[in-house]
Amino acid sequence: MELKSGYKRTEAGVIPEDWTLSRLSTLSAFITKGATPTTYGFKWQSDGVLFLRSECVSEDGLDLSQSMRISEQAHAALSRSQIRTGDILITITGNVGRAILFNLGSDANINQHIARVRINTTEASGEFIYHYLSSPPCRARFASITTGQAYPQISLKQVREALIPLPSTKSEQSAIAEALSDADAIIAALEQLLAEKSQIKQGAMQTLLTSRERLPGFSGEWILRPLGELFSFSGGFTASRAQLSQEGLCYLHYGDIHISDKSFIDVCSEYPDIPKLDVPLKNVSSTSLLVDGDVVFVDASEDEEGMSKHVVVINPNKIPFISGLHTIVAKSKTNDLDRQYRRYCFQTSAVKSQFRFFAVGTKVSGVSKSNIAKIMLPVPSVAEQAAIATILSDMEAEIAALEAKLAKARQIKQGMMQELLTGRMRLV
């Protein structure tokens, strides 16, 4: 491929002729890693100085939920693991190459699975170098040199030898860093808004679905009904994941329910992505064929939260759809539950706690058809169900729109990184 005028080939790819290729060690004299306090006789405590584990350096930035605390004495003794605002942190074991710019403005320490990079030259922008180190190409290069299969890792020597394409002027470095930081700010704002909207929806579900808050125009007592009065229960059609392909009848694998964030599956719109099982329709029991409004629960889970996982089937076109292994199919006996309301009514804390109560097992917990039938559901009038479902559905639509906007913002930032960090697009 012909090289564009004004550019040159380097070990790090094609960059502008006036850019330099520098090893990270020439830009930072302070590349080191942390230590575990307990190795030196110190203990964890509930307050004190922040201590970051490698899990704190997440794909989405600094995750303090994974942090711990140590004493001031331990912080002072572990001087090589101390970090400060402006330091770049890179994971060097496990999920190698994740990078964040530490900017909390407080004292902190890191463990031995994180490398600390402190830029000590006035000729380079620490923010620019952070953005380059967090870029997909740099992450990929770190991943390509890892050692160890069960627990991948890279050495500090390999971090120090990392090549950084650097614009010749600090003003260009700063302009690129500012543009990417602005993109990060937009993403962070959308993430915050999405978290708030999701929390609001969860709160609305816990009040509207339990009658703690009633919608205008509705009154009267809700009736507690066992699910066995509302549904008949049956098992699914047994097939392994290995038997599934892109040919045959749509097949709902219990694993796909577990990994889904949605409480429904639209067979028509999701048809291309639904796994298929090549089996004659006559071989499948009618009780395992899913029709519009059916609810499918998993009958086993490795964690308590997963015990109540389910999907409501949207299938007005009557596309043949098989419920699979480790599923329990709930088919309506009555018209007492609005179909859209079913997407929400099993997600309250009260209903989930009943699933946990009836679950049996140690490493893998299971729930039977007979026990699901005993679960009690508070049931309002169908009209109130429909009104509640409309409100929650509107909230879901707003959240989905925000998720799409966030995905687009992340995609735009990735494109900006590809253009700006390689010099294909120049800002100054």
Image (cartoon, rainbow, N blue to C red):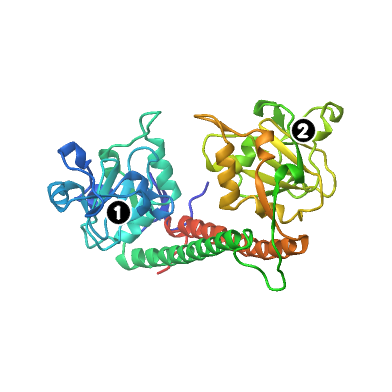
Q: Position of residue 180 (x, y in %)?
A: 43, 63
Which amino acid type is shown beneath numbered disc 2?
Glu
Residue type, mark 1 in image: Ile
Residue 216, given in percent of the width and then of the height, sits at 69, 73
The image quarter in which residue 127 lies: bottom left
Q: Who is closer to the viewer here, 75 or 3?
A: 75
How far across and down, in percent of the image, does residue 74 sit?
A: 15, 48
Badge 2 crowding class, 10 Å Cα cut-off, few under 14, some 14 to 19, many 20 or more, is: few
- Tell me if 174 is positioned left or right of 135 in this view: left
Quadrant location of the C terminus in the rendered image: bottom left
Q: Nearer the viewer, residue 320 or 248?
A: 320
Q: Position of residue 365 (x, y in %)?
A: 55, 32
Q: Does residue 208 appear to the left or right of 316 in the view shown?
A: left
Q: Secondary structure at mark 1?
A: strand
Would you identify the image quadrant in which residue 100 lies?
bottom left
Q: State the residue at coordinates (20%, 47%).
A: 81
Q: Is residue 381 above or below residue 32?
A: below
Taking 31 as reference, is 199 left or right?
Answer: right
Q: Residue at x 85, y 30 (%)?
A: 281
Q: Farthest residue toward the right? A: 282
Instruction: Read off the residue under disc 1.
Output: 88
In the image shown, does 404 or 325 lie closer to the viewer? Answer: 325
Q: Quadrant of residue 118?
A: bottom left
